[in-house]
């Protein structure tokens, strides 16, 4: 670090890195509670409305396959600009949709754009942020997304109340995408801004595994161009090669990550459907889910502090146990007196649980990544977690069609508890709780640097 006159600080990249992510997440948050309602208004059944809503995660999973090559060739900033325009195309399809199937296609395009946008942000944080800031940086990124998902539904609630039509939420997303693309064009390129800082801490990582994370830091990340060169040479099979190479870790830890993603994704589909089934109303649904997003946002720093201080299990276990308990409780509350109040209470419980796990999937992926050429592993890791996110809404839709929404909620609760058990078994094995714990002096120095 002595050779670099400008050590890394969050402030140096805050606007170019976090502002576009906040804008995109705000637009996405505005439409997520409204998608199943819009589908229902176009004539879809509850099951079909759930299927339409699931296309966000299905599109994201599909987009994981080419997004690595896109980011490798275009760079992070250009990839996000392209993703913003693809999302605008999907929004146009949604606004012009005359039936649920056209709406489904538009939502799928939005999911594709989300995959590219999210991977570009994750790639930047992995490549350019020093190891000792990893958990805080990734939990902050998770907090930024949660901030957008908090603001989006609140804005949507006000706009829907003023216009009387849920389609107005899609215009909010369109404006957010346009602002995100504009900010990416106007603000300094974060890749160039962080290159100097990256060179300063690259040498310090050659000593071995990271202190705060208890896992080897990928050496390729010290050379920002290395991942792109490798990915460009192997655009077609890098993901599947990584799955074969790391199949043991991916089967064990990846299955737990998939269940984390499934429990989180199920909330996006199941909660609006539940609100619809109890007659809560469109504006009230957006308001409740927006408040829940605010609770999640308020906990993102707590999650990062817990991970850095006590280990990954102390974040992921409250998250999964809380999600499991919340979904199981909700399954028995559909027809009870005061069901709207109970629904709000359970939504807040789920939001607290999910907020305590902010950034945990990205952080575990970074912890598990190999020392050399981590990009393909991270792609496989994202594919596993996104696979769970994509499967959960389809599962909710199918179980709702063949049984009931309450049965779907109970099933998701059981799967969340199963995920808690898997991670409790394997996180201590693959991500040791203590390994080269940082000294108190180094922590204070990090804190002073971060506040600079």
Image (tube, rainbow, N blue to C red):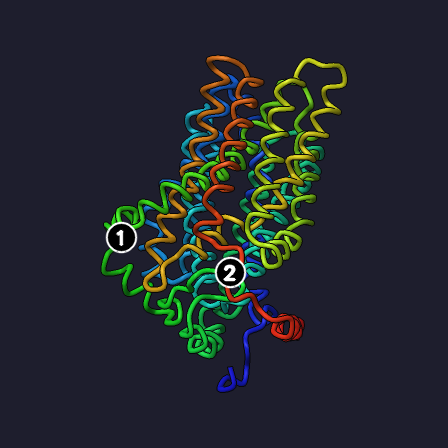
Determine if residue 190 is in view. yes
Q: Where is residue 71 in the image (x, y as percent from the top left)?
A: 36, 58
Mark closest to the chain's N terminus, 1 or 2: 2
Specify the label residue 126 is tagged with: none
User: In whole angstroms, how far apart are the C-alphas of marks 1 and 2?
Assistant: 26 Å
Determine if residue 275 is in view. no
Most foreground residue, 172 or 452: 452
Residue under the image location 60 percent in, 34 percent down: 323
Residue under the image location 36 percent in, 51 percent down: 379
**Mark 1 neighbour density, 10 Å: few (under 14) some (14–19) many (20 or more):** many
Residue under the image location 32 percent in, 55 percent down: 376
Which element type, helix, strand or loop, lies under badge 2?
A: loop
Which element type, helix, strand or loop, lies under badge 1?
A: helix
Q: Please state if 126 lies on the left or on the right of 242 as rendered.
A: right
* Residue placed under numbered mark 1 in the picture: 238
**Mark 2 neighbour density, 10 Å: few (under 14) some (14–19) many (20 or more):** many
Q: In this view, does 240 lie above or below 211?
A: above
Q: Position of residue 447 (x, y in %)?
A: 65, 70
* Residue placed under numbered mark 2 in the picture: 213
Quarter holding the C terminus?
A: bottom right
Q: Where is residue 400 in the image (x, y as percent from the top left)?
A: 50, 17
Q: Please state if 157 lies on the left or on the right of 197 as rendered.
A: right
């Amino acid at each position: 670090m002595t050779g670099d006159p400008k050590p890394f600080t969050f402030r140096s990249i805050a606007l170019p890195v976090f502002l576009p992510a906040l804008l995109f997440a705000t637009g996405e948050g505005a439409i997520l509670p409204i998608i199943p309602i819009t589908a229902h208004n176009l004539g879809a059944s509850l099951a079909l409305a759930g299927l339409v809503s699931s296309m966000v995660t299905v599109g994201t999973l599909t987009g994981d396959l080419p997004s690595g090559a896109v980011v490798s060739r275009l760079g992070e900033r250009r990839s996000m600009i392209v993703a913003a325009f693809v999302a605008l195309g999907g929004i146009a399809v949604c606004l012009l949709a005359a039936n649920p199937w056209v709406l489904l296609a538009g939502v799928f395009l939005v999911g594709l754009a989300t995959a590219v946008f999210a991977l570009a942000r994750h790639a930047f944080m992995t490549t350019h942020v020093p190891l000792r800031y990893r958990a805080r940086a990734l939990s902050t990124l998770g907090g930024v997304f949660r901030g957008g998902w908090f603001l989006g539904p609140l804005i949507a609630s006000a706009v829907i109340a003023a216009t009387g039509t849920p389609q107005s939420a899609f215009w909010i997303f369109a404006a957010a995408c346009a602002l995100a693309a504009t900010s990416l064009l106007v603000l300094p390129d974060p890749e160039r801004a962080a290159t100097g800082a990256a060179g300063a801490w690259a040498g310090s990582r050659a000593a071995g595994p990271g202190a705060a994370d208890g896992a080897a830091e990928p050496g390729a990340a010290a050379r920002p161009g290395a991942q792109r060169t490798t990915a460009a040479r192997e655009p077609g099979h890098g993901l599947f090669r990584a799955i074969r190479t790391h199949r043991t870790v991916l089967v064990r830890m990846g299955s737990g990550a998939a269940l984390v993603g499934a429990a989180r994704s199920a909330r996006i589909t199941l909660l609006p459907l539940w609100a619809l089934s109890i007659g809560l109303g469109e504006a009230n649904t957006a308001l409740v889910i927006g408040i829940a997003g605010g609770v999640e946002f308020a906990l993102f720093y707590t999650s990062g502090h817990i991970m850095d201080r006590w280990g990954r299990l102390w974040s992921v276990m409250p998250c999964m146990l809380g999600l499991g308990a919340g979904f199981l409780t909700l399954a028995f509350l559909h027809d009870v007196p005061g069901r709207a109040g109970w629904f709000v209470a359970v939504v807040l419980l789920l939001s607290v649980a999910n907020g305590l796990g902010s950034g945990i999937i990205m952080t575990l992926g970074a912890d598990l990544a190999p020392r050399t050429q981590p990009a393909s592993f991270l792609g496989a890791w994202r594919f596993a977690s996104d696979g769970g996110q994509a499967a959960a809404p389809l599962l909710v839709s199918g179980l709702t069609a063949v049984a009931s929404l309450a049965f779907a909620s109970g099933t998701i609760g059981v799967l969340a508890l199963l995920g808690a058990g898997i991670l409790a078994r394997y996180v201590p094995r693959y991500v040791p709780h203590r390994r080269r714990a940082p000294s108190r002096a180094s922590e204070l120095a990090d804190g002073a640097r971060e506040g600079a």
